[in-house]
Amino acid sequence: MTDLEADLRKAVRGEVGFDVTSRALVTMDASNYRRVPLGVVAPRDADDVAAVLEVCRTHGVPVVPRGGGTSIAGQATGTGVVLDFTRHMNRVLALDAEARTAVVQPGLVLDRLQDAASPHGLRFGPDPSTHSRCTLGGMIGNNSCGSHSVAWGTTADSVAELDVVTARGQRLRLGQGWAGAPTGLRELVDGELARLRTGFPELPRRISGYALDALLPEHRADVARSFCGSEGTLGVLTEAVVRLVEAPRARVLAVLGYADEGAAAEAAAGLLVHRPLTVEGMAADLVPSTAALPRGGAWLFVETGGFSPAEARARAEEIVRAADVLDALVVTDPAGQRALWRIREDASGTATRMPDGSEAWPGWEDCAVPPQRLGAYLRDFRGLLVSHGLRGTPYGHFGDGCIHVRIDFDLLTGPGIARFRRFSEELADLVAAHGGSLSGEHGDGQARAELLPRMYGEEMVALFERAKGIWDPDDLLNPGMLVRPAPLDTNLRFSVLPREPVEVAFGYPADGGDFSAAVRRCVGVAKCRTTSASGSAVMCPSFRATGEEAHSTRGRARLLHEMLAGEAGELVTDGWRSEEVREALDLCLSCKGCRSDCPVGVDMATYKAEFLHHHYAGRRRPAAHHSMGRLPRWLRAVDRMRAAAVVNALASVGPLAAVAKRLGGIAPERRIPKVATETFSRWWDRRKARGAGGEPVILWPDTFTEHLSPSVGQAAVRVLEAAGLRVVLPPTVHLEKAPVGDGRTVALDPVSLLRGRGRVCCGLTYVSTGQLDRARAVLRRTLDLMAPVLETSAPVVVLEPSCAAALRTDLPELLHDDPRAARLASRVRTFAEALEQLAPGWRPPALDRPVVGQTHCHQHAVLGDLADRRLREAAGLTGDLAGGCCGLAGNFGFEKGHFEVSRACAEDQLLPAVRQAAEDAVVLADGFSCRTQLEQLAGVRGRHLAEVLAEALRSGERADVVGGP
């Protein structure tokens, strides 16, 4: 233990982390930069903050305050001690609705303040797109803005008073009239009045540099306002009094379509006279699908408010009439508005990939110019990109003249980095020529501080240095930011990564087969750090359960980054054998929620499987990998021996079950599910098929349906046949010729007999436990068995969502060298998709009942549930299913040590939804894990949609067949 660490542990009550994981998690923010800190402290209060500053000053170690770590310019990274305010100093301390103020701590997430203010009809005005995870301290440090800045301004406009601790331990209460000003600050300003009155550009989004002009007499010498945007370089914020605004009772969104971004930019400033709440712009490059948008190549999102929906709509229609548009859409439905706003909010992640899939990076994320000059600036900006052979798609706050853009810089090679520098210097000159600010929202950090003389001139920057010296004479706080900055092309986070692709098992087709490129996808947007899942979102259940950065998608990606960095990165130096990485991935549920919910498409479930594959290569695996990873094998053995009844009886004996769970690495809190005494395939063999003629649909007998819940398969057969489809099962013999009849019957030749019988399997349990060699063998055998089917056009219906997802994604990515894998993946259909596509004229029985439950996480992330929604609606099953993850997640919730997190995930959305449901509600859970979790934690029986429909058919409710399949 170092002297610094020992002294900090004695001095503070909060957590002190000098271990590899704690440091690795904060090496980066959402920028291009990386610094390795000495340690991390999570202070409990202002006394802890003061103690940390005293210890670090004694040791000569710098201190970096950090909020949500979503800064884009590098200012939330440092080489000394990082202060993490999100763990303890994260509360609303008071809220005065009458005075419209709130007292908050720096680690408070913005959405939590909005939640507290909303019942009073109030809100905090600024709202960056990261509102679900950015903190008030970070917003004050950067002077953040957001989409509503045309109405409510920047964070500085909403700050009344600030409590700060200076580097030398002074506790100051900052406010107007020189309140809290450190000694010497007033004298500095009084001596530079002329420069301060003329040296700052006039525009709404001027964030760069120190706001020393806020200290002018005509601006009420507002020390709190001048502190905003100082990026943790002047003092450490411990408490803030912020102003709230009245939230509009009704909102309407007008989406205005223009030919291109230039036309949208030219129009934006003219709309401000109508006093909109937002004027946001984006072009078609960033929109996954333009189906929900009016005609055009670029759009303005203009929100209006009012005391009533009619008033808000009237204002929106007035703007549409005044705007010169190609097309327009006025959206009054709140759900429709939220869907459109998600497109805009996800742009910060979507923009990290160009249309061809190549990488794009921040660095020039938020320059701002006077709104009236935005069109001209964008034309010049585009020309500069072309002259350097670069690409980027501008979007952002057009009404304030602030543009976000990620550019396809090559930050991996020397020539590429040199071009990055040249472009940055020329763009700084261009912004200054248009009277703009290098930063319009996210601060200067390392990305732009070096270039501030091009905007302000050397004399003003020298004045900034003098101000920094008054506040922090020892240069203890966040050195290298704003004044005396580090060069913009140093400390790049990519410099430590390997230059050649590492050998991996998965194909990573979206990343050119490069695992490093896959890990680089995480740019720190941190959508995975949201503390509550909204709507159908899944990501990231383990973070919501634990609140720990290490158990977020971003945290795990950071550790994988450090693992790839190896010795060059100083932290994780034992590669795939790293225990730190294994521990961080241990609580990943492999829910795949990040695959769809992460704006940049991080797929941590795949990364986890890859890591486990390498980590345990040639080593002893945990017992759970054998007991549950090889579940298909054990269940087939039980079936062959006709031992299901015996196994169930033994599992019901407490002491025997306890021994089995201990040997199998199973959580003692769990009950072992019962094995079906008759498998689905045996039921199939003894029944007489009643399906119609024609081409067959292949019903996939997944392990869970086959051995643990055959009733789901039986129900699916009844419904599919009722819809006029011919159901067959996959072959069980590797054939040289196509099967006949039901797809399983064949005249066997000697070669076929020698090859032996087998069962198809998606390999899910092997993949989730990282047994990828075994998974590949299982999947190749499956492709061999399915070869005759792949010669036909027959679709493959998979009832278990996790198995369907494995066939859709894991199969082609793991067997990327086998063209049959992609063919099988393309054939996979969910139960609802099969009915919708293959029997479009069939109508399900009318149930007319509410539903409750949860959309399976893999269905949400990989398969989509639109067909399921339409099928439920057709059957009169009303209501939406919850999002999130059930928490059992295959083997995860059964593994020893995971029970509490598993239960916490279920309590996030699923269990509360079931408890609050109407008595006659149908509890839907298409996944075996979801049904098991409901049964074991809530005593509730969930059913697959196929079971619900089959029961209705059996009860005599007739389905109306219109047309045929």
Image (tube, rainbow, N blue to C red):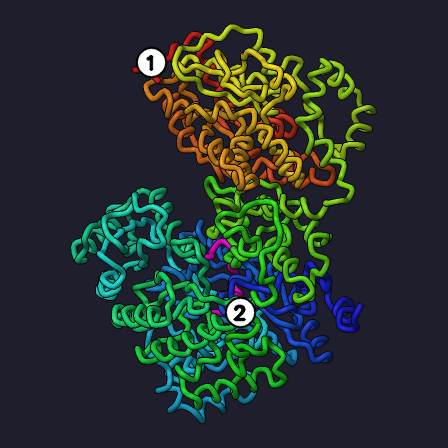
The residue closer to the viewer here, 507 or 865, is 507
Q: Which residue type does callout 1 highlight?
A: Val
Verify whether residue 558 appears in magenta.
Answer: no
Give the residue number, with chain letter if any, for mark 2. Answer: 74
What's the residue at 60%, 63% (across, down)?
497
The answer to whether the residues at label 1 and label 2 have Cβ atoms under 8 Å apart is no
What's the residue at 67%, 13% (across, down)?
677
The quarter of the rendered structure image containing the C terminus is top left
Q: Residues within 10 Å of mark 2 (few under 14, many from 20)?
A: many
- Residue 245, image x and y in percent? 39, 60
Work out how far the residue at label 1 is from the one at label 2, CA to CA, in angstroms.
62 Å
Is residue 938 among what the camera can see? yes
- Residue 205, image x and y in percent? 37, 71
The residue closer to the viewer here, 426 or 177, is 426
Is residue 104 among what the camera can see? no
The quarter of the rendered structure image containing the N terminus is bottom right
Secondary structure of residue under mark 2: loop
The magenta stretch is 129-143
- Residue 622, image x and y in percent? 75, 39
Q: Which residue type does callout 2 highlight?
A: Gly
Q: Is residue 462 above or below residue 146?
A: below
The residue closer to the viewer here, 934 or 860, is 860
Secondary structure of residue under mark 1: strand
Verify whether residue 134 appears in magenta.
Answer: yes
Q: Is residue 379 above or below residue 891?
A: below
What's the residue at 63%, 43% (across, down)?
609
Q: Earlier in the sequence, mark 1 or mark 2?
A: 2
Q: Quadrant of residue 88?
A: bottom right
Give the residue number, with chain letter if any, for mark 1. Answer: 961
Q: Residues within 10 Å of mark 1 (few under 14, many from 20)?
A: some
The residue closer to the viewer here, 670 or 575, is 575
Drawn side of residue 323 relative to residue 52, left or right: left
